[in-house]
Image: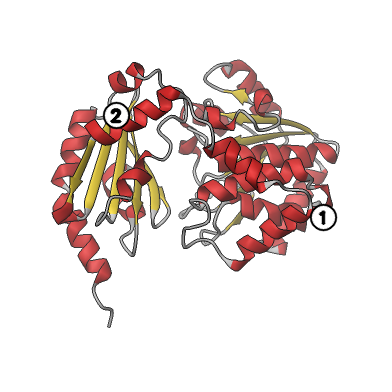
Amino acid sequence: MVDASDLVEFQRHLDGAHHIAITSHRSPDADAVGTSLALARYLRATGKEVTCLLPDAPDEALDWMPGVEDIVLFDRDPGKAQDALHRADVLFALDYNGLNRLGPMADAARTATGAWLMVDHHMGPEDFPTARVHDARCSSTAELLWGVIAGLGGKDAVDATSASLLYAGMMTDTGSFRFSSVSSETHRVIAEMMDRGLDHTAVHEAIFGEQSMDRMKLHAFAVVERMEVYPEFQTAFVHLTAEDMARFHYRAGYTEGLVNRALGVAGVKVAVFAKESTDRVKMSFRSVGDFSVRDFAEQHFDGGGHHNAAGGASTESIGVVMARLRGLLPEIAAGIQAAEAPKG
């Protein structure tokens, strides 16, 4: 998964770096935040000055992560974020494959003059980094980053805290290790992290255990009032308007998992969740089997991601987006049928 030749370039740039900026994508998930904080801990242990930067705030379910309070958020302090980007000798791009994934932080990132190093597992990486470790077959960026840190000679620096940050990314990006991207290597990495003190139960409880009443009510409302199931097309949609989310005092991360609720309906093989924000409608796509939601999202909603898990967005209204999705139901059903047809 990690090519030693790539790490030669990584090490060469890191050797001459004083300040390092670690960036990850808009609407950051556990893989984005966990890898950012774990990499920062490793680099600081080698004597580097490190700033973690995110376009916006992560899910409140990640508030337990050590160091999350020190992350610079572009939407809250753009001046501080731009200063860190422009001072950096090296900039890491973690868990995203193109600068547009940084949303409002993208323009500032494009003006940075330091060397870009990418660690990512999404398909179709852009060519902006100077060097990269990329493997779309890998379960998560966290699993890849473990290999990077180990390859740089830092495995012994991964303590229980760093292991918990990486495990959070691996656990969530694999659907608690049920997706087909999970390999024997995934479990070997976890075994090594457990040997370093990882408390996997504590991480799971921190993310999936206790939830606010508002979040639980929002999920119930979404399932009862906003879920559309089309058995004849083996597809389900869920959507939330801005008014819906305001009603339940929405906070970042409250809608996490809703698309999987739709996918969990008996007979459903493709699910889409759409939510309205101030400047766009953001969509999450999931599938089971051979139907590629990545291709579908890329073709219709300027999206991308993985074969069975992808994202997209539209500047159209939520009503228009939902109408478009309903109009695409025959195409989805035909795609499912073609993907399941016997080969050869």
Q: Amino acid at mark 2?
A: Phe
Q: Quadrant of the N terminus?
A: bottom right
Question: On the image, which quarter does residue 322 sit in?
Answer: top left
**Residue 107 in sight in this render:** yes
Assign a secondary structure to mark 2. Answer: helix
Residue in front for this viewpoint, 219 or 159: 219
The structure residue drawn at horizontal position 36% and vertical position 53%, both measured from the top left corner, is 294
Front-most of residues 88 and 214: 214
Q: Tell me the tag on residue 221.
A: 2
Q: Position of residue 95 (x, y in %)?
A: 55, 45
Q: Position of residue 132 (x, y in %)?
A: 62, 53
* Residue drawn 52% across the image and 30% down it: 59
First along the sequence among labels 1 and 2: 1
- Name the residue tied to disc 1: 153
Dot 2 alpha-carbon crowd within 10 angstroms: few under 14, some 14 to 19, many 20 or more: some
Identify the colour scheme used: secondary structure
User: Is residue 278 at all visible to an observer of this figure?
Assistant: no
User: Left or right: 161 with respect to 343?
Assistant: right
Q: CA distance from mark 1 to mark 2?
A: 49 Å
On the rendered image, what quadrant is the C terminus found in? bottom left
Left or right, 110 with respect to 193, comes to left
- Across and down, in percent, residue 301 comes to 29, 42
Q: Residues within 10 Å of mark 1 (few under 14, many from 20)?
A: few
Residue at 72 percent across and 63 percent down: it is 4
Q: Nearer the viewer, residue 181 or 254?
A: 254
Above or below: residue 246 compared with residue 320: above
Residue type, label 1: Gly
Question: Relative to residue 316, is residue 73 drawn left or right?
Answer: right
